[in-house]
Amino acid sequence: MSQTIAPRVRTLLLLLLAVTGALLAGSAPVSAHAALTASDPQQGSVVKEAPAQVSLTFSEGVAMSDGSVRVLDPKGKRVDTGKTSEQGTNTYSVKLHSGLPDGTFTVTYQVVSADSHPVSGAFTFSIGAPSTTSVSVSDQEAGGGVVGWLYGFARYLSYAGFILLVGGAAFVLACWQRGTGERSVQRLVVSGWLSLTGATLAMLLLRGSYTGTGKVGDIFDLGLLSDVLQTKTGAALVSRLLLLAAGALFIAVLFGAYEKREDDEEKGDLTFGLAIGGFVVAAGLAATWAMAEHASTGIQTGISMPVDVLHLLAVAVWLGGLSTLLVALYRAPSIEPAAVRRFSRIAFGSVAVLAATGIYQSWRQLGSWSAFTGTSYGQLLLVKIGLVVVLVGIAWISRRWTARLSQAPAMKAAKTSAAAPVKAAAKTSAKASAKTSATASVKASAKTSAATSEKSKESEDEDRETEDEKESAATPAGGGDGKRATQLARQRAAVATARDKRLRDADPLRSGLRRSVLAEAGVAVVLLAVTTVLTSTEPGRTVEEAEAATAASSQEATGALAVDIPFDTGGKDGKGLARVEIDPARVGGNDMHVYVQRPNGKAFDIPEVKVSFTLKAKDIGPLPVVPDRIATGHWTASGVQIPMAGNWAIAVTVRTSDIDQVTVDKNAQIG
């Protein structure tokens, strides 16, 4: 039975790692917290005279440097001065050269949002009249490519390291103090510290390229590293490294001086001191995430940051303790049922804190029920909630095994107590019987014993000579006693390890608990991967606010109507967004612009776009419109006739290849 468990465990772990890798590698770069809500000139607009500057307004403050905003003429030549300045609340501008020609100009931007994520995008406007343009905006999004993948993997390792470090130490101090002497537990906690430290250093080096050029060669650019150290994220990462230095001292005391203490009073004082110091370090580490990511921006930051710290600590105590318990069940010779019971209670409390803080975070980041299904953040959050429910279900099974494990010693003690009188009576009866028969048999056995004694002595002497000869033959000449002793020590250690493993595997209660805890750990690995992706996804509240602000800005400036319609043709690279702008959105002739974008906001170069209008209430339509392509991802049509005011269904047919095509629609009030 035990021989078949190990391959299954390895297979399950490999499967879980593969699922985690698929989640990390298959997740395309996502939008960050900040979103472009307005621009001057507006996207797709036609101005009579060349503007003196281009202004961009975001949903929140962003970090912007010279060169973050570029304006390119129809031939692809830069026409901006390169100097950016802040014009107002979340509004930034770049000056343009004078004497610009007529035609279509492309504006590209790449900034860093307040929650540390890079944001990039592009749009066009025209001077005089639209024209063709040679500008081809790269599909590479800020934060994508090899550097983006490496940065995302480092983020995952940092979360995993934090969980193992904090959760492992908490499990030992609060539940199983004898575990400080277990090598496997020591390795787990130290591995967590090493993972978090290495990931933090990697993120510091990758940060400049991640938010800038995206080039692998810029990872070791000291100039970029110097710029990173002056940002909020850089300060958070450096603070994390300083706290990890204190964490190293904590680990040294926990597995060194603490483990060697024998006096109960001294050990109790040291336990209290380590608990206080460990909590301060753990809370400080959690705060380095809270101060630089989603919790630090948006509404109620004074509440959200402490809540985020509690959320991270609850996750670490639960999942990190779970990992330590799993290691103890598989590697330690034994673990007391009382320690498992204590962790079960602590895990329950952690889940309660996790649920309360998670509900608040969900409300803060989503803002509406529709964001659950209408935004990427909401969809990922639903996946995370589902995984947590599965994890809690498996934990309930583990609690049942824990209860059985805790009852087993009591049952054994009861059986021993009940059997004691029977054994005592049997022993008394045996002594009486032996006394009666001893006198009769002693004389007969004396002669036999004397005869066999001589033969036994001769046999023992022969066995000793045989063993000496074997050892002499196996031991090489020239001082091989040390090597022989080493070999024997290794053999004894291997035998002892195999014996301990057999004893562990022979306990059905322990084996059952191991399987359920292993299943919990497997789901936790996937949950951590989803959480990592979720932390870099634009919150649903921000998505909806940005869309509302964009529509309001467009309507206020020109009376135009802007409708965003997501699409997915089903083929490779078939997802995107079609934005239909109708000006002035009234009965009669209208100008229509269609912008086709990738999920990252970049212009999507596709072969064909068609639009139709249907007023179902009056049984009018569909009225087809075939716009003309004037730039990458930009299609336009003039004189689009809307015969009657009403709630029109705007259908857009998008073809991304010869065979991949889809029609999507959305209702909008026109007239």
Image (cartoon, grey):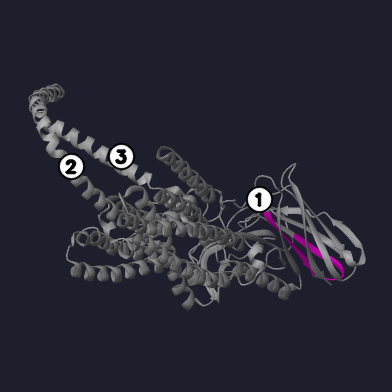
Horizontal and vertical percent position of residue 590: 83, 66
Horizontal and vertical percent position of residue 50: 66, 67
Q: Amino acid at mark 2?
A: Ala
Name the residue carrying label 2. 434
Q: Which mark is residue 134?
A: 1
Name the residue carrying label 3. 498
Bounds of the magenta segment: 576-593
Q: Amino acid at mark 1?
A: Ser
* Depth check, front residue: 36 or 668: 668
Alpha carbon distance from label 2 to label 3: 41 Å
Which label sits in the foreground, 2 or 3? 2
Q: Is residue 287 above or below residue 579?
A: below
* Depth check, front residue: 271 or 653: 271
Main SS of residues in magenta: strand
- Residue 436 falls inside the magenta stretch: no
Q: Is residue 113 above or below residue 151?
A: below
